[in-house]
Each structure stands twice: as structure tokens, then as C-alpha cells.
Amino acid sequence: MSARTPPPIFFMAAAIDDGMVPAIHSIKMAEKLQNEGLPYELHMFQYGDHGFSLGRNLIEPFLQEKAHACAQWLSLAKTFLMHQVSPETTGKEKSPFAMFEN
């Protein structure tokens, strides 16, 4: 890595019903990233199976009865990346106890 190398950032989206990769692996990865202080975002979806928006779903989009929340991964990733590139697009959440702090 050099000074011109961008810092690593991680966007993860996983389905709990993934039959190939246990969802707990994503949680463990997020824990490691948290401990390292690296920027990440993790979304866990109830349904989506493995590769929920890759391959077959690009050719045969989700049918109405299969319109799971995981279909939102792309817009979530876009927002995450936008915030990484332009931090001014985010607002820091204020503590609800800020008014009591000195």
C-alpha cells in the first residue's frame, strides 16, 4: 500500500437462509472489522439464499411473490459508498443525552 492507496472499506450483505455460507461468517467478519477500526456496513436479510441478486436474478428478476428485502442491497451499497467518498453527505447522530453533558 502507498499513500495513494485508498483505505479499505467493506459493504456486506448476507441472507440468513444462505445454504452455502453461514450468516454467522458475516457477523464474525464485521466483528473483526469493528475491532480493527475499519469502515464497514453489514445487512442481514431473512431471505435471499446464496447470491441473492447475482446471476439468475439479473436474468430473471425477483417475481412479486419473491420480492424480498435483499433486493435493496444495491441502493444500500450505493449510499454506503457515497458516504465513504463524500463524508459531508452524512450527519453525525447526536446523543439523546447531549443536553445533559457539559
Image (cartoon, rainbow, N blue to C red):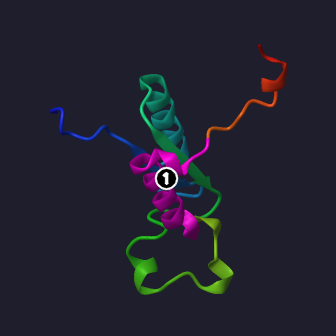
Q: Which residue is under mark 1?
A: 80
Examine the structure image and report whether residue 56 is included in the region drawn in magenta.
no
Up-down: is 37 above or below 89? Answer: above
The residue under the point 51% across, 58% down is 79
**Residue lying furthest right:** 100
Instruction: Say left or right for 10 vs 95.
Output: left
Where does the image place residue 66, in percent across and percent down from the top left? Answer: 63, 78
* Viewer-nearest residue: 18 or 69: 69
Up-down: is 58 above or below 32? Answer: below
Q: Secondary structure at mark 1?
A: helix
Instruction: Say left or right for 51 vs 93.
Output: left
Quarter-wise, where is residue 91 in the image? top right
Where does the image place residue 3, in percent across and percent down from the top left? Answer: 18, 32
Where does the image place residue 14, in percent across and percent down from the top left? Answer: 52, 54
The region drawn magenta spans 71-91
Quarter-wise, where is residue 7 in the image? top left
* Viewer-nearest residue: 97 or 8: 97
The residue under the point 50% across, 83% down is 61
Q: Quadrant of the C terminus?
A: top right
Q: Quadrant of the N terminus?
A: top left
Up-down: is 21 above or below 24? Answer: below
Q: Residue 48: tell me if it is visible.
A: no
Magenta stretch prevailing secondary structure = helix
